[in-house]
Image (cartoon, rainbow, N blue to C red):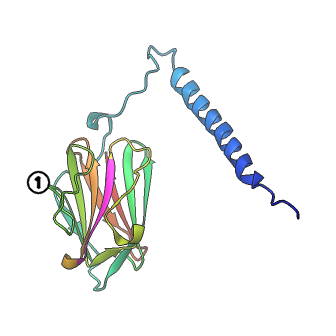
Amino acid sequence: MPRASHPTPVRRRGRLSAAALTVVVGAVGAVAVGCGGDGQTGAVTSLSAADCPFSGAADPVEGGSGEPGASTLTGIDTAKDGCVDVVTLRFDDGEPARWTAAYADAAVLDARGDDVAPGGAEALVVTVHGATSAVDGGAVTGVGPGPLDYVEDLVVVPLPDDDELRIVLGLPERLPFDVSGSDGAGVLEVRTG
């Protein structure tokens, strides 16, 4: 009876990934160390709010399409735009009808009344009214925010009894932010820096 072959592509992929990771880490190290000659030490430091000119504000904002109907959060993407962190919320049926964004002045609670407690000293809460989440089966979900400068944590908090969804961004301090939708594209973009 012939023996089953081992999944060599998986092993090869693992070796390639390790090699690729070594190249990337080496390249990043070379860039960080090789930036000398201009009086700088080459040390890598995180940005502060003063290092990133950003035109948002820390005041509460609201918006939405105004079109009636429910929305479902289907995905979250994170990216950098210069020194600005960008969190893109993707919905299945156009921009949500109504949303608000503000810093929390008290604990952010889930549907059971438990404190969500995102990482970071401040919690920026984007509340989407008339929305549910398909992310991780609709449960309270922590999302790895990726290599961002300011967003330290990202938590999706469905509140089905209140017919709303909260996306909580853990930030190191109260930073300026901007939230905008896109006409018909099903995207809500949160920018902070």
Q: Where's residue 38, x and y in %? A: 48, 16
Q: Mark 1 is on which residue type?
A: Asp
Q: Where's residue 36, x and y in %? A: 51, 17
Q: Is residue 155 left or right of residue 162?
A: right
Q: Which residue is drawn at 27% across and 38% down?
A: 49
In which quadrant will I find the N terminus? Answer: bottom right
Residue of label 1: 105
Secondary structure predominantly adopted by residues drawn in magenta: strand
Does 9 appear above or below 1? above
In which quadrant will I find the C terminus? Answer: top left
Q: Is residue 177 left or right of residue 60?
A: right
Magenta-drawn stretch contains 62? no
Seen from this angle, which residue lies furthest bottom?
A: 68
Seen from this angle, which residue lies furthest front?
A: 1
Visible in this render: residue 74? Answer: no
Q: Which residue is drawn at 31% across and 58% down?
A: 155
Q: Where's residue 68, x and y in %? A: 28, 86
Residue extent of the magenta highlight: 153-160
Q: Residue at x 53, y 21 (%)?
A: 33
Q: Residue at x 25, y 44 (%)?
A: 120
Q: Between 169 and 13, which is closer to the camera in this rendering?
A: 13
Q: In this view, does 107 lie to the left or right of 169?
A: left
Q: In this view, does 114 lie to the left or right of 178?
A: left
Check disc 1: other Cα within 10 Å, few if <14, some if 14-19, many if 20+.
Answer: few
